[in-house]
Image (cartoon, coloured by chain):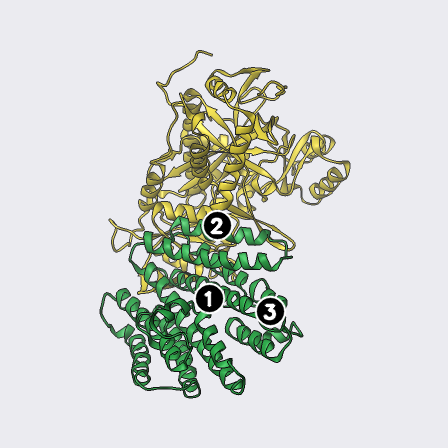
Amino acid sequence: MLSRTAAGLFWMSRNIERAESNARTLESRLINALESPEYSTGAVRDWEAVLEICAGVTEYRAFYEDCTAESVASYITFDDRNINSITNCLGYARQNARATRDVLPEELWQLLNERYLAIQEFNGTWTVQEVHRFLREVKQLSYTIQGIIESSMLREESYHFIKIGKWLERAEKTARVLNVVCEKTMESEDELHADYYYWLSALQFLNGYDAYLKRFPPTMEPQYVLPFLLSYEQFPRSIEYCMEHVREAVLKLEHGQVSHYSEDLFFALDRVMDDFVKIKFRKRTAREIGPFLDDFQNSCGRIGSVFASTYYLY
Amino acid sequence: MLKNYPVSSFYDEMMKEAGQARPHYEKFHRLLHSMEMKELHEKHETAQLSFLRQGITFTVYHEEGGTERTMPFDFVPIIIPDEDWERIEAGIKQRVRALNHFLEDVYQEREIIHDRIVPREVVENNQYFYEQQASGLKLPHNNHIFLAGIDLIRDNEGTYRVLEDNLRNPSGLSYVFQNRFVMRKVFPELFFEHDIWTLEHQMSRLHQALLSHVPVHAPNPDNPTAVLLTAGMYNSAYYDHVFLAQQMGIELVEGQDLLVKDDVVFMKTVRGLKRVDIIYRRIDDDFLDPEVFSPDSEIGVAGLMRAVEKGNAAVLNAVGNGVADDKEIYAYVPEMIRYYLGEDPLIPNVDTYFLRDKETRDDVLQRLDELVIKNVGASGGYDMLIGPQSTAEQREQFRRQIEAKPEQYIAQPTIQLSRAPAFQQQRFYPCHVDLRVYAVGSDDIHVLPGGLSRVALKEGSLVVNSSQGGGGKDTWVMRRGGPQHAE
């Protein structure tokens, strides 16, 4: 397989995953915001949290003065100036798919193309209901695409590159959500129920709320939520689960063997897994976990670049 | 349904006279009448959408960048009776064979110039004559033309004539297949009772022909590696490239995916470098290899021509084919056929006048309003004057251009291209059509049954190019032995 094709598949997959998780984060926040006074400091802080997860607060501030539901939703969803806006992510994904369509299932390409063309026709003005509908459609698009991949692709190189992209993106996103949420709980230590609210949001942003309730009491204690999102082995968005799947996909790509050219990649992956083992069985507070998450996000960056050099991606 | 359809002095592919179809269209005509207008309209819309959804688009460039557009599809097919097709097929084979002889000759011995059949300056002044880069190369099968697209038109009498040869990178083959595919899916009932040539096995023939161009030093001559080299997704014919690569099961590569090391071509894969033997390139000569062509090309592969010279790689179509398909050399093709093959051309040319001769030029300048003027180096319907449809201002502009560079232009009588019904806005109206026939060369020449029928959907327009609002039709070649009607 051409390296350029592999890179295209990897990034297509990441962009679709990113569009889906940004859609979910924004959607949860839009619903939660209905119950909080719009211009309170708390509200601004919460919108900033969402911006930090889906884009960047500094970048946002360059274009907008205040943090209202409308402007944040617009920036995250449709704004061309935001490189991680949902429409941009889908545009890149479609472009990646177009450049690799000779190896993709035809249905996947057609679906992505159809959605892209529908977005192009969107005239720019939208109501809140329309945004909600759009975000729901983005999530469903991602589910359908994953379904097509799982049900029709040969388990060969192209499939594994797609999976590596998805799991890596997901692990990084979970780390980012945790990082932002830990910070926010520290900033709002004195406020009543703030902790509860932030840990609940983290679960909602990561599609883990219902799953969490099946295992833990609904009290949103960090001692339960934090390990659940970090390393709960049954939860498919916990960082450890995602990283294990990255490793598994790389191993399949390498037919179960570590060769001299893939040594560095396996080494980088093993190091991350070791770090998890170290913190896993210890009780951690939000404050203590911060440096670990920073470290982890750096490791993800390193894995990304080792991965690229192993397979000559550029 | 076709009651108000006007038949005039133009040759109509389908209708003999008002209300009466030609014999080979009778069944189709009858089937059409059994359908409701509303149903046809809905199906027509479904067909257009299916092209868009599949991303079967080409890119049109304008000042603000590129826009992806689909080629409009019209469901009234062009039906060709078997006896007409046999003549076309033989004529195309003959023509492509002669053109290949010509290419082999001008890049080796140049006998046709010594024998004064083709003037030396016509070859040497040609901007696509790559004497230095293409001379003396030893090509597999001595074949320069792997894929040719020969454009045919029909005049008032219904006689087929060659309008243009495309021997560099003829595009549109994917549309031949997709038009048939969509037609079968959306209008299955129109195929009833017709016995036509299928396109099913054509791709494997193309693939075989491609793989037969094994360079002399291929390490694995029985199992060569072939790729399709594209300029990338922003190229106007990108879909064509994707389709061909997909159907032939070969890698679709860009220049950045290839590199030349020790005069051998490799592609960059996730497992390292992999040797490539055959390159079906869809980028122009000028961008192919910055070492010997345009040095600032970013889509080419440096050193590619060294690999070809050494016999380590084959590049298809061969470099330098442009010398045989421009609008000036076109006029000499009938002579080439006589010279190389000793045969009379089976399909005539359109008469062509050169403007470097003063007497002809003066005559042409007098009659600009009745002639077609073409730039010998342009294609795609650009830099072209259609006299009867031009304004005084446009004619004046061309007069100046011709006087400044007479050797750059040719003149042809305005051919009244044949017409066929097209269905747009819920009615049938006559539109001008042409036919691009595809020939595949290896040790022999194979002609794909039918081809791409292009239609000028703007009423009255003579320009069928997709970049200028042209559309496509399915093309049916009747099989011999099918139920026949006497004319």
- Going by the numbered disc 2, the residue's amino acid type is Tyr
The hue used for chain A is green
On the question of residue A216 being in view, the answer is: yes
Looking at the image, tell me whether mark 3 or mark 1 is earlier in sequence order.
1
- Going by the numbered disc 1, the residue's amino acid type is Ser
Do marks 3 and 2 both belong to one polypeptide chain? no
Report the side of A173 relative to A30 (left or right). Answer: left
Q: Position of residue B159 (x, y in %)?
A: 53, 22
**Label 1 sits on residue:** A21
- The label shown at residue B238 is 2
Q: Are marks 3 and 2 in contact (CB under 8 Å)?
A: no
| CA distance separating discs 3 and 2 | 37 Å
**Label 3 sits on residue:** A72
Please name which of the two marks, 2 or 1, marks the residue nearer to the observer: 1
The hue used for chain B is yellow
Does dot 3 land on a helix, a strand or a loop? helix
Q: Is residue B19 above or below residue A238?
A: above
Please name which of the two marks, 3 or 2, marks the residue nearer to the observer: 3
- Going by the numbered disc 3, the residue's amino acid type is Val
The one of B476 and B422 positioned closer to us in this rendering? B422
Q: Chain of mark 2?
A: B
Q: Residue at x 35, y 18 (%)?
A: B481
Q: Is residue A36 above or below residue B6?
A: below
